[in-house]
Amino acid sequence: MIALLIIAFIGIALFEIPDLIQRKRWRELLVFLVFLLFAFIVSLLQVLEIKLPNPVKGIEFLVKYLLSVVG
Amino acid sequence: MPKRRKILFKLIIFIIFILSIAGCWNRRELDTLAIVFGVGIDKAKKPGNIEITAQVIKPGEMKSPQGGSGGGGEKPYWNLTSSGKTIFSAVREFTHKSNRKLYFPHNEIIIFSEDIAKEGIRKYMDFFIRDPEIRRLVWVLVAKGNASEVLETKAILEKVPARNIAQLIEARAATSQASAVRLQEFLTRLMSKTTAPIASVIEITREKKEKIARLIGTAVFKDDKLVGYLNKSETRGLLWVIGEVKSGIIVVKSPGGNGEVSLEIICASSKIIPEIKDNNIHIRVEITEEGNLGEQTSAEDLTSLPAWTVLERRQSEAIHNEVRRALKKAQELNTDIFAFGEAVHRKYPELWKDIENRWDEYFPNIEVTINVNAKLRRSGMTTKPPKPE
Amino acid sequence: MKLEGGKISSSHLTFLMIGFMIGSSLIFIPGQTAGHDAWLAILAGLAEGLVFAVIYTTLAMRFAGKTLVQFNDIVYGPYLGKAISIAYLWYFFHLASLVLRSFGDFFTAIIFPETPMIVFIVLTALICATAVRNGLEVITRCGLILVVTMSLAVLTTTILLFKDMKLTNFLPVFDIPLKDFIKASHSAATFPFGETVAFLMVICFLENVKFAKSSAIKALIITGLLLVMASVRSIGVLGVTAPIHTYPSFQAVRLINIGNILTRLEIIVVGNLLAMGFLKISVLYYGTVLGTAQLLKLRSYLPLVLPIGAMLVSFSILQFDSVIENIFFTFEIYPYYVIPFQIGLPLLSLIIAIVRGLPKD
């Protein structure tokens, strides 16, 4: 599963990076790498079954809190 | 992007999709399935457990002529039984006996034995509505006796007993003296607060040592427990009210006195109208029917206008009596099989909130007026009976 | 530098909006909590949704040629505007992953019980990524074909179920307390009508922005009618049993039986869901990617498509552990969660724009 994940992300990188370098779009390349790295870390942690904070739980908590304040 | 890489990329995407479209994770080929045509549920010997009988067809045997010497006389079906605490566990138990996994989408009937039905069947319904393989169009039946025996009855014109029973249910429209209830309809009644569920009744009769399945009458449930049966004329009484009569024969006395006349029901419809009279709930049932003269054993001329009118009146009376009988039985059992409660709910939503939970106290004493508007339309190929003038 | 070269016509916009709103609402019927009055709740929700749509299109026409992210900077200034844009991008992203997740749940629950959900989610995301990379015009053209097919399918299945419908299932009309009804109709307004706020990222590419309002209103009304039809179909056929089903529409279509020949048509619902869900995810995905690119002042949004797609996939898996959490969120939390995005901020933007006379030429 981890191997599959790494292959997929390398695939994405190979698909985009050469074109960006060729056109000298450094800003785009930087943003791309940051986003890709973030996505990779998140999915890797998921594959490793490490519990990540779930923003939906936060939203649920917030909405319930606000509803109880309003009445 | 260079052209070469673009093509390569498209190729990879293509391969991914081709591989994933053709095969699912749990793909099942026809020769790895045991196709179930009917399910029967009985009490197991061990208390608290249930026994399931699944009728699985044998595709190889289906081809060979039934009972012919060439086919080897093998039955084209296989009845498997297994038991467990719950339906699902028992269903999975089948894999100990069958090398193929049971496949339910082609199932046509679910039969509950009388014993199970008397104890309540809500707990067994859940599997049948939750499992995505089972369709809501299956028929629900109650067997007088064991469900497994019903699945072993001899089917002469069909190859598989379950298929035979499913077709009996479809054929019952010719008499309208047996109920036909699909799982969805059963579920709707089960989920109603007041309407009582009904189911078809199947019983075994012996003819020349052969066990034959016979479909007749209606099983009546209170909440989810079987409390009684309607006989065939009471069943038609019920079907008149809920507008399910498709066809059938009404036999009345000939106006002249000697002999009988058979009237064929062509179409029928009904309306249930609740009314409040002097602070009492009152139900009016309007039944409209059209029939044809189908047969007469008397020698008189029935096509004269006075005789025709008498026949129409007798037809109305016969329908009226059938409905009365069904009503009496339902009120004795205190089961609202006619969905009168729902009719009141629709017309008087405010009042309903008060009486909803006390409907059981109202129903046995509720007054019902039955208005039958029965017409006779045609007299068939002849007018007068065959006798010398 | 323009990020999107394509232009769409107003009729294309209408079709795309219909597909977007139908999206996943053909399986989770909006207003379901109103029981057999769900169709009324949808109509009431439509009325509320029309108000939203008028706000959005007025905004879009005022700031012609500018996306939500761009005019947030004008209305709220560069810093607050960016913060609000990020919030919106989060909302689009979250909604896309929500739809993706509902997809996965549906397929694993009903059709392929043993296949891991990730397979459907990755494949769907891949298709949507392809569409987004190809730009808005491609998505809209898909919309035209798919929406016409879908409408015909809804119509056909409804006609085939006529004989199984009981009109008495709808009586008594308005049989629920007013408070519950308002809750149900508001829920129908936020899902799906209010979700058209995502079109603030799309309307600016309209060939003639004058028609934005009329085509949005047309789309909302047609969607409302289609949804009413779908809910009438489910309620009429399923009656009291409708509330216990996870996917009532699917169950209703399963009951089609015309002379034992025309049966097992439920796959039509699945096809519809697949097509409409694709449109919805694509539009939201496109909005997220384009908005992020504009926010970071990139010259092209293409490099963002795949990384954000990967995030979509992982987040759609992460957010819920079970279908029960998904249903709870959709019906209990979502109607309140979206209030700032769907009503609060657009209304505020419009008021500020009118008061300050924005945009100044």
Image (spheres, coloured by chain):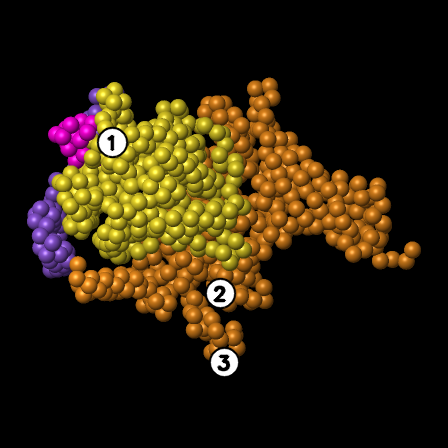
Q: Quadrant of residue C93?
A: top left
Say which chain tag 2 marks.
Answer: B
Report if residue A38 lies within the magenta region.
Answer: no
Q: Nearer the viewer, residue B239 or B11?
A: B11
Q: Is residue C80 magenta?
A: yes
Disc 3 designates what residue? B70
* Contact, mark 1 vs mark 3 (Cβ under 8 Å): no
Q: Is residue B229 left or right of residue C86?
A: right
Mark on residue B262?
none
Any mark on residue C341, and which? 1
| The color chain A is rendered in | purple
Image quadrant in which the N terminus of chain C is located: top left
Q: Nearer the viewer, residue B98 or C296?
A: C296
Q: Which amino acid type corresponds to the residue marked 3 in the rendered image?
A: Gly
Q: Amino acid at mark 2?
A: Val
Give the residue pinned by disc 2. B160
Query: Quarter holding the C terminus of chain C?
Result: top left
CA distance separating discs 1 and 3: 75 Å
Asked if residue C315 shows in the view, the reply is no
**Residue B344 image position (x, y, % from top left):** 53, 29
Marks 1 and 3 share the same chain: no
Q: Which label sits in the foreground, 1 or 3?
A: 1
Is B281 located above or below residue B285 in the figure? above
State the hue of chain C: yellow
Pick whichever, C227 or C132, lies toward us. C132
Q: Viewed as shown, does residue B154 lie left or right of B315?
A: left
Protein chain holding label 1: C
